[in-house]
């Protein structure tokens, strides 16, 4: 026999005394929390977006000076339906940067390019010299490659020695005379080839692919306008 019998009447009375939270009240509270969270996310995005945009602008400006040595100023353009147009503030179109020296003379063109690497996209800014119809070099804007391996495209002097890379446009076909390609380490024979880095072949190929795709898409349409933008003050 149980020494401490449970008084069922007392238990039932205690349960009846517990306040019941209406489900509508719980839904209202959860809805309020969700709305507040959404508001804070939007507010954070609005506050940080100008700062992010400014940081990106500063990074691009520094990269332009690196891939177009001697450039102290630039003008932004976009290609649309066979026309080269000045970019208006706030435009989301892919940009082409014309880099000028202190005398307002065109030194080169900078453009963005990207291709899939080993761990993610490899995003670049490269410099094109219309005088030699070649790509002088590139600057990595963003990548997630393995430290010590994939990032050798930045630090490896032999890889950087691949440049300039030929990017001549064939006037008859309207395409690059030779596609820019990455070849096995030590097998480069032509000026449009890029010697891969041993142990970082995938990332090396991403560089070649990115440059080729961008150059094929931009340069044939851009070259007819080079004379028009040869001097900074020629077009306002």
Image: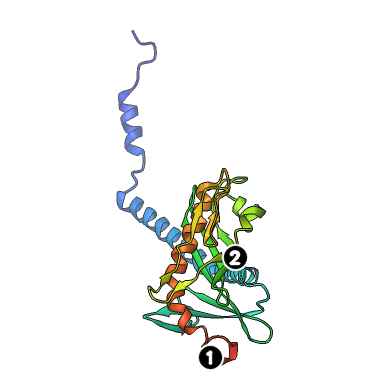
- Within-10-Å neighbours for mark 1: few <14, some 14–19, many 20+: few
Residue at position x 39%, y 76% from top?
172
Q: Can residue 95 be seen in this view?
A: yes
Q: Which of the two labelled residues, at mark 1 and mark 2, occupies the earlier sequence position?
A: 2
In the image, is residue 73 above or below residue 20?
Answer: below
Q: Where residue 217 sits in the image (x, y, percent)?
A: 42, 70
The answer to whether 191 appears left or right of 18 in the picture is: right
Q: How far apart are marks 1 and 2 (CA)?
A: 29 Å
Q: Is 201 or 166 nearer to us in this picture?
A: 166
- Closer to the eye: label 1 or 2: 2
Residue tagged 1: 235
Helix or strand or loop: what does disc 1 sit on?
A: loop
Q: Position of residue 233 (x, y in %)?
A: 59, 91
Q: Which mark is residue 59?
A: none
Residue 131 percent coordinates (x, y): 58, 77
Helix, strand, or loop for circle 2?
loop
Question: The N terminus lies in which quarter of the figure?
Answer: top left
Q: In which quarter of the image is residue 33?
A: bottom left
- Mark 1 and mark 2 in contact? Answer it, CB < 8 Å: no
Residue 185 left/right relative to 33: right
- Disc 2: which residue: 164
Query: Front-most of 48 and 232?
Result: 232
Residue under the point 36% across and 33% down? 14
Depth check, front residue: 73 or 22:
73
- Is 102 located above or below residue 200 in the figure? below
Q: How crowded is mark 2: few (under 14 residues within 10 Å), some or many (20 or more)?
A: many
Left or right of residue 99, residue 208 in this image: left
């Amino acid at each position: 026999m149980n020494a401490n019998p449970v008084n069922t009447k007392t238990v039932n009375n205690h349960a009846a005394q517990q306040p019941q939270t209406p489900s509508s009240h719980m839904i209202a509270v959860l809805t309020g929390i969700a709305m507040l969270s959404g508001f804070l996310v939007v507010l954070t995005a609005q506050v940080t977006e100008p700062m992010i945009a400014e940081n990106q602008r500063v990074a691009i400006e520094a990269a332009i000076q690196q891939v177009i040595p001697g450039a102290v100023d630039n003008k932004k353009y976009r290609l649309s339906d066979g026309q080269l147009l000045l970019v208006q503030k706030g435009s989301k179109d892919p940009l082409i940067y014309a880099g000028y020296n202190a005398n307002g003379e065109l030194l080169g063109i900078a453009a963005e390019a990207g291709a899939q690497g080993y761990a993610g996209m490899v995003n670049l800014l490269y410099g094109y010299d219309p005088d030699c119809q070649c790509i002088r070099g590139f600057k990595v804007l963003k990548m997630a490659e393995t430290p010590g391996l994939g990032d050798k495209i930045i630090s490896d002097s032999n890889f950087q020695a691949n440049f300039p890379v030929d990017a001549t446009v064939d006037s008859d076909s309207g395409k690059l005379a030779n596609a820019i390609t990455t070849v096995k380490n030590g097998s480069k024979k032509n000026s449009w080839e890029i010697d891969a880095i041993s142990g970082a072949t995938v990332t090396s190929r991403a560089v070649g692919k990115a440059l080729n795709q961008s150059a094929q898409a931009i340069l044939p349409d851009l070259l007819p306008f080079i004379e028009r933008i040869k001097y900074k003050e020629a077009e306002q």
